[in-house]
Structures are given as C-alpha cells and as structure tokens.
Image (tube, rainbow, N blue to C red):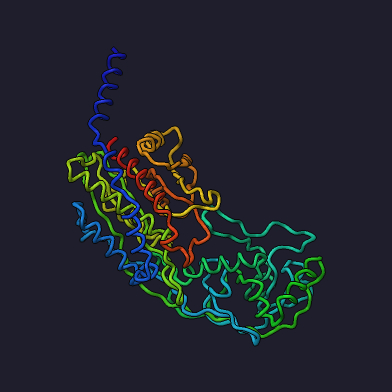
C-alpha cells in the first residue's frame, strides 16, 4: 500500500510540473538593448547620482514608477498609492570640515577623511600639532600632548613591522585598527591624524567614501543640539597632504619615515598651530520605495519579493557618482524581468505564487529602504517565501578580469536545500554562456552589504545575485558605457528562470 501511495504522489508531482506555465519562450524577450536603455537613463547627468532624498532620486523613482505603470500590475496596496511606499529618514549632513595650519588648508573628502564613517566630530579645535613618529606607546615617553593634536605614521617601525592595519574586504570596504588612536587619547590628545602607508590607496578610499560620509541617514532621532562633539576615530590622510600640513617636502617626510622606521625616537618637527573645524546640519528627508505587484493564481502559496536598490551616492562638488553598475544594472534587470512576467500574465501564463517587484531607496545610506519594507511590509513577512536581490550585475571583479560570463549567487540556504536544486534546474533552462557560481552558505553570514540582509535578518530565505566590486566602485567613473550588456542580459534571464521556477513550484 505504501509503494502505491508513493507512486501516486510521484505521478501527482509530475502532473503539477506539467501544469507549470512555460517561461522558456519568454526568456529571449530580455535583450541587451532594453537593459542598456534603462541603465543609460538612470546613470545620466540628469539623475545626478540618485542620492536618497535628492532631486535625482525623485526623478529615478518617477522613471521606475512610469515603467511599472505600463504593466498590468497593481500599484495600490495596503495604503500605498500609485506604486510608492513613502517614508522619512533623519539625516546628518556634513556642511564643512577642514584642517588648517599656516602651511596648508586641507578639505574633507579631497585631502583627508575620518577612519569611522560615523565619526560625530562637530565644532572647532585650535591647538598645537605634534609629530609623534609611529605613534607607539613608547613614543609618548617624556612628551606632554594633553589637549593637543598628534600626527603619526600608519603601522609599526620596520624592525617590528606588521601587515598593514587595513583589511581588504570582498565588498571593497576597508577597516582599520584603532589601537593607536586609543593610545593617543589615553595620553591626553584631543585628535589624532594618521599618515597612511599606501598613498594611492588612501586617495582611492577617500574618494570612494566621501559622498557616503558627507550625508548619514537613519531612522533614529538625532540629537540636534549644537556644540562640540569629540572625535571617535583617527583622521586619515595621504603622504602629500601630510607633507603640506607639516610644511615640509614629500622627500623630507619620506626621510623622516625611514629614520623613524629604524626604531629611533621620533624625529623632531617643530610644533605648529592647527585648527580643525566641522559643522553639520540635521534634516528630515522624505523618500520612497517603488513597487509593482503581480498576483498569482494561488496567492495562498506565498509571495516572492524581487529587490534592487535604485539609489546611489549623488553629487560631491562638481562630481556626479553615476552608479551605472551600482545599481542601475540591477534596476534594469528588475524592470525587464517584471516586463516579461507581465507579458506572460497577459497571455494567460500567470505564476502560481504572487510576486512583488521592489525598487528600494536608501541602500547606500544603510539598507534603509529594505529595512523599512521589512518593518512595514506591504504583505506579511511571514508569507514571503523568498527574497531575490540583484546588485551590481554589469561589471567583472578583479578575480575574473575580462572573463565576464559569471555571476555569484549567494544564499542563506544550504547546498542540499530544495532552493539550490531549483537554482541548478533554472540555470539549465537558460541557453546562454553564463556560468553561475553558487555559494550557498546555510546559516552563515552572506556576502556584502546589500538589501538581502534586511530580509535575511527577518528569517526569509534569500538569493543574492552579484558580480563583485571593481576599480570604479563608488567612483564617478562608474558609467553606463562600461557595462557588459551581454552578460547583464544573461544574468537577467537566469534570474527570470529562477524566479519562475520558485513562483510555480
């Protein structure tokens, strides 16, 4: 009897598979030309880098809403009106920040930055600038730096040299050892300036982080009281900026570094008067997620959410951070996949599970749009069976170089899960040259800081499609002409095939 029951269940399973609408004839509807049109539009000067709350982000939201409006999907659900989920975040904006001696004036973002992206310093420091060699604990012996600003080299002297304090993370973000800052403050210093080892790297990181650090946003109420706030991290600058500040040549500073590196006491450099001043403003910033909802034939089976963030870094001075790969590429894929699902639905091939296409804002400010959706879901989070996130699909990372026919597919499910089986089957259904690299991690932390993490924290299974960072990451040079539209097409087709398998299985 048991064998008969298993046989009947198997036959029933096959019949269900046979009833699944065929997506294969629609896959070729996604083309590189249409993807290029979306990316070129969103990553143009007109959209000014799409910074959350700024006019460019509003234009991008309107563009996405208009595209969704062409489809047969609903845009009015649970109080949300016309494809928009509106909310407000609190912003702390850096209006001015500089370091000045009689020798030079350095501007934040162009010449220096703080180690912590959330350093709260505000106010004015007028004191003496004291050179402390490598800033080791022994270097303070016999020196009184109480109430002063210290400046020192990164790392340790060569006789006890170690690997650089910096760690290059896969997501392209760098973290630093704060030990020497703690030493400086313990000896009474009120600020610490670190001269980075890798001068080119310092310039690159400063340029990459400048727009992020100029405007910080959160849902927390910010204490807007004026008044001084102390540093919580080092100031980082490169070799040339340090030489300018100290009033010596770069060659002289290199000689001092070499001599200090031999383990000798710090070379004496005459103390100089220094001023450090920063002012910040506090604002409430309205913004919005943009969505389109395709109701399935059996909505009780749950909901699949397909996510891509459409915000980027905006402008800094006369520079526009275009964000073609990050993440106009993911939004283009989102719009085209939604368009194919709409075409299938119009022809009577509506998916069984419902699908929510969600373009989120505030990712660059700390995953704010996806966090807001999870905390204030249009549909109950418990009904969400899977979240698919697409971020940076148009370029290749350093590892792959010119070999662009790949995509990383991360998941918080394990390799022996049914979701992994579905992904493999979906990949086999796509007839292109793409080679997906599946990285199913089980319950371990997933790759990168992107919007899948908001859903992962809510206990929802996720798939994260990502190609890695590259030399133009978070730079104005992340432009539409550098996107590999052929591979972007292949990835979009793979995501569509996977979405369809999940929505109908």
Q: Decide if residue 174 is on the left or right side of residue 382.
A: right
What is the count of numbered marks? 0
Q: Measured from the top left, where is residue 206 in percent x and y?
A: 55, 68
Q: Is residue 233 above or below residue 37?
A: below
Q: Nearer the viewer, residue 380 or 11?
A: 11
Q: Is residue 50 visible?
A: yes
Q: Nearer the viewer, residue 43 or 358?
A: 43
* Residue at left offset 62%, top offset 75%: 191
Quarter of the image with the C terminus in it? top left
Quarter of the image with the N terminus in it? top left
Q: Is residue 92 visible?
A: no
Q: Decide if residue 377 is on the left or right side of residue 193.
A: left
Q: Is residue 257 above or below residue 420?
A: below
Q: Measured from the top left, where is residue 449 in percent x and y?
A: 46, 55
Q: Measured from the top left, where is residue 90 in percent x and y?
A: 38, 69
Q: Nearer the viewer, residue 110 or 300?
A: 110
Q: Measured from the top left, where is residue 493 in percent x and y?
A: 35, 45
Q: Decide if residue 183 is on the left or right side of residue 219.
A: right
Q: Is residue 16 above or below residue 157?
A: above
* Residue at left offset 58%, top offset 67%: 115
Q: Decide if residue 265 is on the left or right side of residue 320.
A: right
């Amino acid at each position: 009897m048991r064998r008969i029951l298993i046989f009947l269940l198997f036959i029933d399973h096959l019949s269900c598979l046979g009833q699944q609408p065929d997506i294969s004839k629609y896959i070729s509807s996604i083309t590189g030309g249409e993807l290029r049109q979306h990316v070129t539009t969103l990553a143009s000067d007109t959209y000014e880098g799409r910074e959350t709350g700024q006019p460019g982000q509003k234009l991008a939201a309107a563009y996405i809403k208009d595209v969704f409006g062409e489809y047969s999907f609903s845009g009015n659900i649970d109080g949300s009106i016309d494809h928009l989920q509106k909310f407000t975040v609190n912003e702390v904006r850096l209006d001015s920040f500089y370091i000045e001696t009689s020798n030079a004036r350095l501007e934040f973002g162009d010449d220096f930055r703080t180690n912590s992206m959330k350093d709260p310093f505000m106010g004015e420091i007028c004191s003496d600038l004291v050179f402390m060699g490598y800033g080791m604990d022994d270097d303070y012996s016999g020196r009184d730096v109480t109430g002063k600003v210290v400046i020192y080299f990164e790392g340790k002297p060569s006789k006890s040299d170690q690997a650089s304090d910096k760690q290059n993370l896969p997501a392209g973000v760098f973290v630093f050892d704060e030990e020497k800052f703690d030493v400086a403050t313990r000896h009474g210093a009120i600020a610490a300036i670190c001269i980075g080892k890798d001068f080119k790297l310092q310039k690159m990181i400063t340029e990459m982080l400048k727009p992020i650090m100029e405007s910080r946003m959160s849902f927390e109420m910010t204490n807007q009281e004026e008044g001084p706030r102390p540093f919580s991290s080092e100031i980082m600058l490169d070799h040339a900026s340090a030489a300018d500040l100290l009033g010596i040549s770069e060659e002289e500073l290199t000689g001092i570094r070499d001599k200090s590196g031999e383990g000798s006491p710090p070379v004496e450099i005459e103390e100089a008067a220094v001023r450090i001043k920063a002012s910040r403003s506090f604002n409430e910033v309205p913004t919005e997620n943009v969505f389109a909802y395709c109701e399935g034939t059996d909505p009780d089976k749950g909901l699949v959410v397909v996510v891509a963030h459409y915000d980027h870094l905006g402008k800094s001075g006369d520079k526009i951070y275009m964000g073609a790969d990050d993440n106009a590429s993911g939004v283009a894929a989102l719009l085209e996949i939604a368009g194919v699902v709409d075409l299938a639905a119009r022809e009577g091939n509506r998916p069984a599970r419902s699908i929510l296409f969600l373009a989120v804002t505030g990712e660059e400010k700390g995953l704010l749009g996806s966090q807001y959706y999870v905390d204030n879901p249009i549909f109950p989070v418990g009904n969400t069976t899977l979240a698919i996130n697409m971020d940076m699909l148009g370029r290749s990372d350093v590892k792959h170089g010119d070999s662009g026919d790949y995509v990383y597919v991360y998941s918080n499910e394990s390799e022996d899960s049914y979701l992994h089986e579905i992904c493999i089957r979906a990949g086999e259904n796509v007839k292109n040259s793409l080679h997906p690299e599946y990285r199913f991690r089980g319950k371990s932390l997933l790759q990168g800081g992107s919007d899948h993490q908001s859903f992962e924290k809510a206990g929802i299974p996720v798939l994260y499609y990502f190609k890695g960072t590259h030399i133009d990451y978070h730079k104005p040079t992340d432009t539409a002409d550098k996107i590999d539209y052929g591979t972007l097409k292949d990835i979009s087709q793979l995501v569509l095939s996977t979405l369809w398998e999940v929505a109908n299985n």
